[in-house]
Image (cartoon, rainbow, N blue to C red):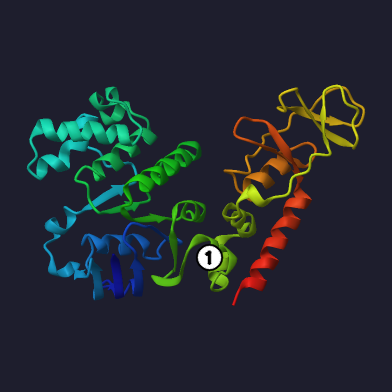
Amino acid sequence: MIRFEAVGKRYPDGTTAVDHLDLDVPAGTLTVLVGPSGCGKTTSLRMINRMVDPTEGRVLVDGVDVATRRAHDLRRGIGYVIQNAGLFPHRTVLDNVATVPRLLGARRSVARKRAGELLELVGLTAGQGDRYPAQLSGGQQQRVGVARALAADPPILLMDEPFSAVDPVVRADLQRELLRLQGELRKTIVLVTHDIEEAITLGDKVAVLRPGGVLAQYAPPAELLARPADGFVEQFLGVDRGVRLLSFHPGGDLPLRRDNVIGEADTPVEAWCLVVDADERPLGWRRGGEASLLPIGHGFDPATDTLRAALDAAMLSPAGHAVGVDGSGRVLGTASAESIAEHVRAVHAARQVAAP
């Protein structure tokens, strides 16, 4: 566990970067520090590995004050990932990843073997290990940075804006990769970002910091979205926090209708009907008696997708209905945007009744 106890950081010019921070990061979880520029999130992160020392309070790792440990000994058990990866340009990818094990005394052959395993773990190939960083894309370089941080098998991983320098598509892919890795490795991860969407996507818990380094709220993402602590947190979460909250509602309980699903030769029974083939796979939407079909947009799988995915599918559909499909692509039924909203209201009402 990582614990901040009344931690503060003030600079000689009077600037307060962090103000009386109390925070517990449970072992094996992914905690995100998020907030606007100048709120102290990176300073807080760097106090964990003593790149910055607090002017008051204590930072403890597994019950031990980090100030009592030599910095280089402390950092051997802490991986560190920064934006733009920070790779050595004159070393191959494989040797970049092998750097820390070599510094810790591992033989070159052992370190390189471990590096190859880690490259595979983060989704890169053995062939890419022989390249130099400049020969890789930005997203691939970030994967190398994560592999290097994991090379000594540290229990703690610190990540400072690790995906901010890549495009949105690559960023989403890297986020999925990080969640997959965390599912396998269960490291204690502290990640800094300015992007609330990224924080909500990745975090087991999210710490929202306000300017001046003050903790505004620390909660699981769903609680944060449902019950922001104050106006600052509500404003920082944005006007679409209700839509984001749908990501925490599973789609499996959403009622689907079948009465507007017809075969190719059937007569439409409503203004909009979903036409399926003999294998129950969607062919498109038919409006009234028109012969042409309009594309469904995209479907959603209630077994794996959330209500946010269902609402997105409904909003992109020409008929205003999401198409629910199973893992094989066969139609389960449809749901309108209105019925999805009604279902959400019912879920909220049920939770209010159940709340103590």
At a point 63% along the width and 48% down the height, the residue shown is 252
Q: Is residue 307 left or right of residue 16?
A: right
Which of the 4 image quarters holds residue 173? top left
Q: In this rendering, is residue 206 above or below 283?
A: below
Q: In this rendering, is residue 336 above or below 343?
A: above
At a point 80% along the width and 38% down the height, the residue shown is 319
Q: Quadrant of the C terminus?
A: bottom right
Amino acid type shown at disc 1: Leu
Q: Is residue 164 visible?
A: no
User: Total of numbered circles in the picture?
Assistant: 1
Judge by depth and name the residue closer to the eye, 9 or 29: 29
> Which x, y percent locates residue 237?
56, 61
Judge by depth and name the residue closer to the eye, 148 or 133: 148
> Which x, y percent locates residue 304?
57, 43
- The crowding category of the residue bearing disc 1, from other C-alpha atoms within 10 Å (few below 14, some 14 to 19, many at least 20), is many
Q: Residue furthest front?
A: 279
At a point 10% along the width and 43% down the height, the residue shown is 103
At a point 69% along the width and 50% down the height, the residue shown is 254
Question: Disc 1 marks which residue?
Answer: 224
> Which x, y percent locates residue 57?
26, 76
Q: Quadrant of the N terminus?
A: bottom left
> Which x, y percent locates residue 165?
40, 42
Q: Is residue 327 left or right of residue 144?
A: right
